[in-house]
């Protein structure tokens, strides 16, 4: 993968660094609503404390995987067909048996209250609004309770889990989520320990007062609020509470605790995908944790074809990482993803304008996907396949609206 030197998160051209779609009108000096998802990044940075911004944006090590996730989309071109009736494009589909309005969802991210006061409640409202009805994967470290979220959600809720030393805690949160009406479990399998997230270390990241993992007791979330210069409270917490001994044999125990479907998140190879499908896993998320775990790991779009081939239709395959445009969604679907999950851009939307901002981010992606399907001559999701795509030289790095000058100094 060629390292383009662009913004590791939004892929902005370092020469231009701005987007005409989001620049303020000089005559009025008033910033219009962003016309692209990347436009919300600039708004979010203006509103967030520096430590929070870098917690959201940062990756592991040199952040090469964050850049690779974006660069992978620029190396895939589209082969549109013409004279197809695209007077109506149908984006609806199902995920784990639930109907949704578009093949999108919200990836699991902790502590949404860092972005806005309503936190995950705003997120699930956004995911259910404007005809979206898309799933939200709720982090085990959510800053609002499962019951609060279930009361507001109109799209499916899935619960993301880390493998904690405390099995009694895992059992309790799984049963609480199931009782609240959650529809699936998503076990993160790429985190035996936290990646070296240098931005968090540099900023001494810790949780501010009033924000906590509301579905876990204080004994499990100890010292997340404690600041230490040159240290991340999240990394110290992970070292103490995440169990690195997780293996394939542990999946049986988790399945015994619930009737919910089990999805594995963090699979990047055919070997692991085939083994998961062979064990009857209900779904796979092709993910590299947004570039926050193993620096230098394969981009998710590049890993997707081998995972889809290895699964061979035995379970649905999903993807996250680097989604910024409707054409990105189109490319992932054409390579076999059932749906894609969006991470950082949802937080940008929350920080910019709460529920409305997050809903606009998801709506933009849906609307851009519909446009792309029409212009590619594919009026339905069933019409998408690898014949839509061509590999070639990476396109020029697009002007995607935000360049973070701090990233040019390196992580």
Image (spheres, rainbow, N blue to C red):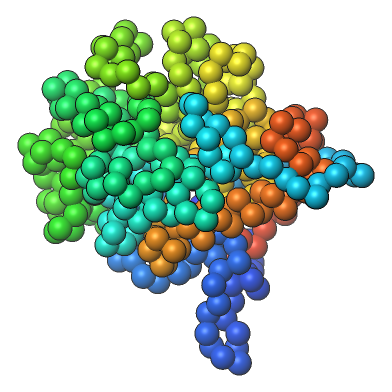
Q: Tell me the residue at 19%/23% (across/down).
A: 171
**Residue sitting at 59 percent across and 76 percent down?**
23
From this view, report whether residue 10 is shown above or below residue 295: below
137 sits to left or right of 169: right
Image position of 226 with respect to 321: above or below: below
Q: Residue at x 81, y 47 (%)?
A: 86
Q: Nearer the viewer, residue 134 or 18?
A: 134
Q: Residue furthest bottom?
A: 27
Q: Residue furthest left?
A: 219
Residue displayed at 21% across by 31% down = 176
Quadrant of the snapshot with the N terminus: top right
Q: Is residue 338 visible?
A: yes
Residue 398 x/y as whole percent? 67, 58
Picture quadrant where residue 15 is located: bottom right
Residue 196: give x, y in percent of width and height: 33, 40
Report the label total. 0
Quadrant in the picture for residue 246:
top left
- Above or below — where is 185 with respect to 274? below
Please provide percent x and percent y for residue 396: 72, 54
Q: Position of residue 113 (x, y in %)?
A: 27, 56
Q: Is residue 66 visible?
A: no
Q: 191 or 315: which is nearer to us?
A: 315
């Amino acid at each position: 993968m060629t390292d383009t030197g662009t913004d590791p998160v939004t892929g902005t051209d370092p020469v231009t660094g701005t987007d005409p779609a989001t620049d303020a009108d000089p005559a009025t000096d008033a910033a219009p609503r962003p016309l692209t998802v990347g436009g919300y990044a600039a708004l979010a940075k203006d509103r967030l404390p520096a430590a929070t911004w870098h917690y959201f944006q940062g990756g592991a090590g040199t952040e090469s995987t964050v850049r690779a996730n974006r660069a992978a989309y620029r190396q895939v071109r589209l082969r549109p067909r013409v004279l197809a009736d695209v007077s109506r494009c149908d984006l609806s589909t199902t995920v784990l048996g639930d109907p949704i309005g578009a093949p999108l969802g919200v990836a699991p991210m902790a502590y949404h209250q860092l972005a806005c006061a309503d936190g995950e409640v705003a997120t699930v409202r956004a995911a259910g609004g404007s005809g979206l009805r898309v799933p939200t994967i709720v982090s085990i470290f959510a800053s609002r309770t499962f019951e609060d979220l279930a009361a507001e959600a109109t799209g499916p809720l899935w619960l993301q889990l880390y493998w904690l030393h405390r099995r009694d805690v895992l059992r309790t949160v799984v049963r609480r989520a199931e009782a609240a009406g959650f529809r699936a479990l998503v076990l993160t399998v790429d985190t035996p320990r936290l990646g070296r997230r240098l931005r968090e270390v540099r900023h001494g990241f810790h949780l501010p007062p009033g924000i906590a993992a509301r579905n876990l007791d204080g004994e499990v979330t100890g010292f997340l609020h404690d600041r230490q210069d040159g240290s991340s409270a999240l990394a110290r917490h992970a070292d103490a509470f995440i169990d690195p001994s997780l293996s394939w044999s542990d999946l049986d125990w988790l399945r015994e605790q619930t009737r919910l479907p089990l999805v594995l998140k963090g699979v990047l190879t055919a070997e692991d995908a085939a083994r998961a499908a062979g064990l009857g896993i209900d779904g796979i998320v092709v993910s590299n944790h947004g570039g926050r775990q193993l620096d230098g790991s394969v981009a998710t779009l590049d890993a997707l074809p081998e995972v889809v081939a290895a699964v061979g239709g035995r379970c649905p395959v999903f993807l996250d990482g680097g989604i910024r445009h409707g054409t990105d969604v189109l490319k992932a679907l054409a390579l076999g993803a059932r749906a894609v999950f969006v991470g950082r851009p949802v937080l940008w939307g929350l920080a910019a304008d709460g529920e409305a901002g997050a809903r606009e981010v998801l709506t933009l992606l849906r609307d851009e996907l519909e446009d792309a399907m029409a212009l590619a001559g594919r009026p339905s999701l069933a019409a998408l396949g690898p014949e839509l795509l061509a590999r070639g030289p990476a396109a020029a790095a697009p002007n995607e609206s935000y360049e973070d000058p701090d990233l040019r100094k390196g992580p």
